[in-house]
Image (cartoon, rainbow, N blue to C red):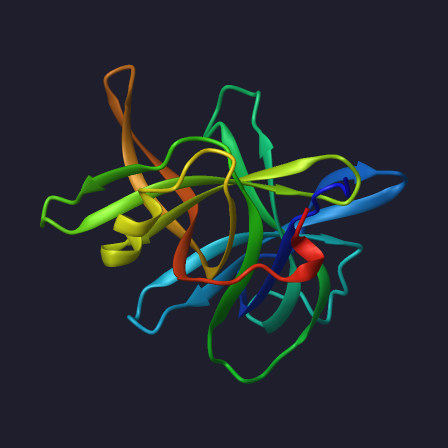
Amino acid sequence: MQEYTGENKIVLRGQGLETPALSHQNHGVDYYLVPLRVPRLSGTDDVLNIVTANPDPAVWAPGQWVSVQGEVRSYNNRSGQGSKLVITVLARCACRDDTEEGENRLVLAGALCRKPVVRRTPLGREICDLLLAVNRPYGRADYLPCIAWGSLAAHCGGLDVGERLRLEGRLQSRRYHKLIDGEQVERTAFEISVMNLLPEEEDVQP
């Protein structure tokens, strides 16, 4: 049987907030981390962490608008500080963009790796929490938290662990407060807001 390979594509347009800072080195390549402000139509902003190799200073100057194409990545934070699951965007291509309009769209295909949880917000709106495992071509996987709303949440709540899922949506950031040693500490969570479920393409079928 052919090995199942996920689909992971994201397109962003936003404004770099800081000078890229060295994050890590892999196979002799330096990777840098830079926060990207991506405006929503609602007027709020998502601040997403972009990882890019050897960034061009002309593209990533603070305040410059940038168009990014890449993949959503996850890894486990074992430092004991911050969120345990860290979500970033690996930039495969980045260029200056003077459109000055936010863009945030992605397509993911993977398998559910835990049972979906359906709940209601304090205002009574139905919401479903999902965890999607998206395989990489070389044997690893990214574990990406997703949320669906309304009728889509009800549908997702009926899915089983291991089911294949292909979706389109957006990557968003959400600030929250957590009580640690008696003090309220602000944290940021990253999750995919599901807009639509898509039919699987032939190249992502097992």
Q: Is residue 199 left or right of residue 154?
A: right
Res. 11 in view: yes
Q: Is residue 167 left or right of residue 6?
A: left
- Could you say which is closer to the camera, residue 147 or residue 204? 204
> Which quadrant would residue 177 be assigned to in this image?
top left
- Residue drawn at x 59%, y 72% is 64
Q: Is residue 10 left or right of residue 127?
A: right
Query: Where residue 114 sits: x, y (%)?
Result: 44, 30
- Residue drawn at x 40%, y 51% is 173
| Extreme residue in the front direction | 1
| Extreme residue in the left direction | 123
- Could you say which is closer to the camera, residue 139 or residue 104? 139
Res. 90 in view: no
- Could you say which is closer to the camera, residue 84 or residue 152? 152
Query: Where residue 27 sits: x, y (%)?
Result: 88, 38
- Residue drawn at x 46%, y 33% is 161
Query: Where residue 19 sits: x, y (%)?
Result: 63, 56
Q: Is residue 129 left or right of residue 167?
A: left
> Which image quarter holds the N terminus?
top right
| Extreme residue in the top direction | 181
- Could you say which is closer to the camera, residue 190 or residue 38? 190
- Residue drawn at x 62%, y 72% is 67
Residue 161, above or below 78: below
Residue 165, above or below 143: below
> Which quadrant would residue 52 be assigned to in this image?
bottom right
Query: Where residue 163 sits: x, y (%)?
Result: 50, 41
